[in-house]
Amino acid sequence: MKVFFATSTDNFEARMPDIMAVKDAIIETGNVLTRDWIGEAKEAYRGLTTLDFSKINKSVSSDLLRSDIVVVEGTNGGLSTGFQISLALQKNKPVFIFYKESAKEILKNKLINFVDDSRISVNYYNTKEDVAKILKNTLAKKFSEKVRFNLVLQNLENGYLDWKSNELGVSKSELIRDLIIRALKSDKGYGNI
């Protein structure tokens, strides 16, 4: 799954263990980051480089749009993370927000906790393992959900599907799903998207 990871850079260095716990859990659960920006941000906050915020804004928008889900370490929320959450919801992306368990009392009245939207999942964690467990459970459920879409075919293509599904004794949908699964298994580049 392609994941866009966001967090506030407020108090960045002090929060690095928590930020890395969430980032590492994303990767260790078999997901791919659409943008790995933490190293660049570390260098900038240490004065080793300067950031081009115009370029970053464009990258954030395009990388968020390429993602399947958005994961936010939101313990130190900020305007940027709020913007990114709003953009994700506008683009119908599921958003997983992780707060440190130790900050639960302080964060309980944040506005995001009262937004009634099934695409938002607010979670509390202590360790990287907590984040990984939540991600694994939620993403496994998401992958098991079925999605319906329309497919427009030429008569020749439809004729072939009719013939082949009849020959195999399966529905056209089953035949198409089988072809997609075979392509997924053989496509070495898919995990690198």
Image: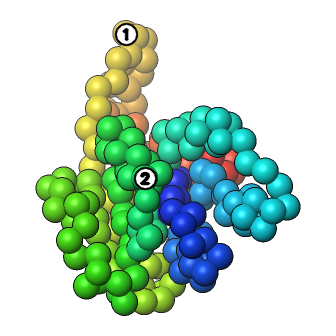
Q: Residue at x 42, y 89 (%)?
A: 126
Residue 32: % across, % down: 59, 59
Front of the two marks 2 and 1: 2
Residues at marks 2 and 1 touching, judged by CB atoms closer than 8 Å: no
Which label belongs to residue 79? Answer: 2
**Residue 56 lies in quadrant:** top right
Q: Can you say whether 52 is above or below 10 in the image?
A: above
Q: How many marks?
A: 2
Along the viewing direction, whichever of 51 and 127 lies nearer the viewer? 51
**Residue 106 lies in quadrant:** bottom left
Q: Residue at x 85, y 61 (%)?
A: 48
Q: Amino acid at mark 2?
A: Leu
Q: Residue at x 34, y 45 (%)?
A: 86
**Residue 38 lies in quadrant:** bottom right
Q: Is residue 61 visible?
A: yes
Q: Can you say whether 161 is above or below 85 in the image?
A: above
- Colour mapping used in the image: rainbow
Residue 88 lies left or right of residue 107; in this view the side is right
Residue named by callout 1: 155
Which residue of the protein is positioned furthest toward the top in this rendering?
155
CA gap between label 2 and label 1 equals 52 Å
Secondary structure category for the residue under label 1: helix
Q: Can you say whether 134 is above or below 44 in the image?
A: below
- Neighbours of disc 1 within 10 Å: few (<14), some (14-19), many (20+): few
Sequence-first tag of 2 and 1 = 2
